Image (cartoon, coloured by chain):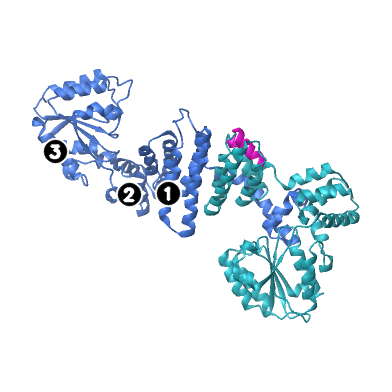
Amino acid sequence: MNVLKKYSAKSVEDLVGIESEVKGIIDFLKDFRVLKKKALLLVGPEGSGKTSSVYAVANSLGFDVVEVNASDKRNAENIKSIVGGASKQAGLFSKNKIILIDEVDGLSGNSDRGGVREINSIIKSTSFPIIMTANDEYSSRLESVKQNSSIIRFKKRGYWHVYNFIKLINDFEKKGLSVISLKKVASMAQGDVRSALNDLGNVESDADVNELFERAKESSIFDALKIIFKSKTVESLLQSVDNLRGMDVRDVVSWVHGNICNEYEKPHELRDAYDWTSRADVFLGRIGRRMYWRFLVYAKLFSTVGVGLSKDEMYRKFSRYYPPMKMRGVSKNSKIRAENKAFGVEFSGLTHCSSKKALKEYSPFFKKSFLSEKGSV
Amino acid sequence: MEIWTEKYRPKHLRDVIGQENIIKRLDAFTLTDSMPHLLFAGPPGTGKTTCALALANDVYKGNVKENFLELNASDERGIDTIRVKVKNFARSRSIGGVAFKIIFLGESDALTSDAQQALRRTMERYSSACRFILDCNYPSKIIDPIQSRCVLFRFKNLGKKEAVKYLKNICSVEKINASEKVLELIFELSRGDLRKCTNILQSCSVLSLDVSEEIVYEVASLAKPDEIRKALELSIKGDFVGAKEMLLDAVYKYGLSGLDAVKQIQSEVLGLELSAKSKMELIALVGEYEFRLVEGSDEFIQLESLLAQFFKRE
């Protein structure tokens, strides 16, 4: 059986750590008849427990759930027929119903045309409680819906909450993953319980976890680069910082630095962006010298928010991002470096210079003949 | 391979050219049996190492090997290695009836000030048995306590006359045909650096024993990689990716340190085809980035960021 289904919350007691949010839902259902706003909007990041709470509460209180989620086509017509229908008729055995519209901020502009307007009109006339979920509270599609609903905000789950949860399941299922692996899974999830459960369901051994972890790291830097280069507001740029949690700031700086020229085209943008990574690097240098780790904050903000705000407008082009130059150029340059080293050692012995100085002073004149001599030996 | 800078390095103080005052004072040490610590400061190719070697040769006659230790501050890994080597060297008595041994520490301005503090104690400890000759480009980089223990000799760039005379001697031995004008050109291009003069002359002679001005220009351009100027020009023209690759290639090819590269960028700025105002702004930026290079952690990030500041300037 799918781990996700098996360990989803069955009743209110299973909902650990979000008690106050759950109480809000229960209150809404109990007071529904006297409430003015006939809909409830649950907002919060993925895997914070919005949908599971609705089902668990429904289970405990004896409600049926009629769900419309993003996989259904949700234009005005469909919503009217599914939700509108459900909102009028009483359940056959007079059991109470909850109408759940999942991911309302995901209503798409074209194929879900008129969906939002229809939802609003249903909210006004419904005889059953309507609960909606959304990730992005500030989505423009939600503006009118928000006025007709009460809002409950779910927060990201803490790292330890996720860790304890998957540890429990690991023991229960006798998967036998190491503590380190569990911690990796928990940190990858970044507060998203569902994704942690999914990951856990898909791995059999510590090696699997490692592979997953490396892939996640790569993809999280690509996601972050996309945000940095494509968004313009401080809020979403800060989200890129969030995405990078757990990554070495040095890597972040060099990834961002290495990709600026793949995105920005205007002179002042390019100059400003590189100026920010340069400043970030200065702080990295200062950390190294003084062991003062708080400087990391600046290195991180400069290389993400600083670089992101260097653009006037988002470029509406498809950009490919690459690993930093340094990693790509290593093999090509290692040959030159080896040659230089051999030259330096040989000439420093001959000329009373250090190898570095010998390389600088003599290699322009002697390197060619040095190499051809070496080659013939 | 024969390297002319070594082949024609003067063996005795009396043969050293150009630094008459210094030679006179150094020569005095070979007659008496006492010598202080010495600090040789001056630009490259002016005879600092040569003087140290010649002095040792004149003092110890045949026994140089046993009494003279040459160390290089930038090659010896850290002050500890230097200390151990000095200790082992100083332990045995000097040979040949001279009261002291000589330790020559080249490129000593490469030592950090902490390392110099350690060096100072080492100098004090072994000063009864050893004399130190420190060599550096900038005496200001040597900490005061060491400076005050040394007699400072300031080496100046060679004059044209002396350098040309020296090159003429090489030409006659190596059977090279070069006019006075050509030799003067070599001197001008090397800015008084006799090592560079000799290297240029040797490289020219490989191409042809009749050295012409054209050959000199061709060879001299080797010494100053024009990749860096080209990289700046590419960035100004708007090809930043190309500029970046050019710069990195130059850095690897010539084994430049980040600071070497910045120094060269700075020297190129005034020659670029830009408005005077842009040039001044860029020089200010180069200064800022040289500072960041010293403070920062990754030379490549700083170099590329500096290169980006040239992007599409007018």
Find the distance from the CA under tag 3 to the CA under tag 1: 44 Å
| B75 over A254 or under it: above or below | below
Q: Three-letter amino acid code at disc 2?
A: Lys
Q: Write the residue at 71% across / 56% down.
A: A358
Quarter where residue A95 is shown: top left
Q: How many marks?
A: 3
Q: Three-letter amino acid code at disc 3?
A: Ile
Residue A375 in sight in this render:
no
Q: Residue A298 carries which label?
A: 1
| B56 over A195 or under it: above or below | below
Q: Are marks 2 and 3 on the same chain?
A: yes
Q: Three-letter amino acid code at disc 1?
A: Tyr
The residue at which mark 3 appears reads as: A26
Q: Give the range drawn in magenta.
A: B229-241
Pick the residue in front: A249 or B59: B59
The chain under label 1 reads A
The residue at which mark 2 appears reads as: A175
Q: Which x, y percent locates residue B21?
A: 78, 67
Q: Do labels 2 and 1 share a chain?
A: yes
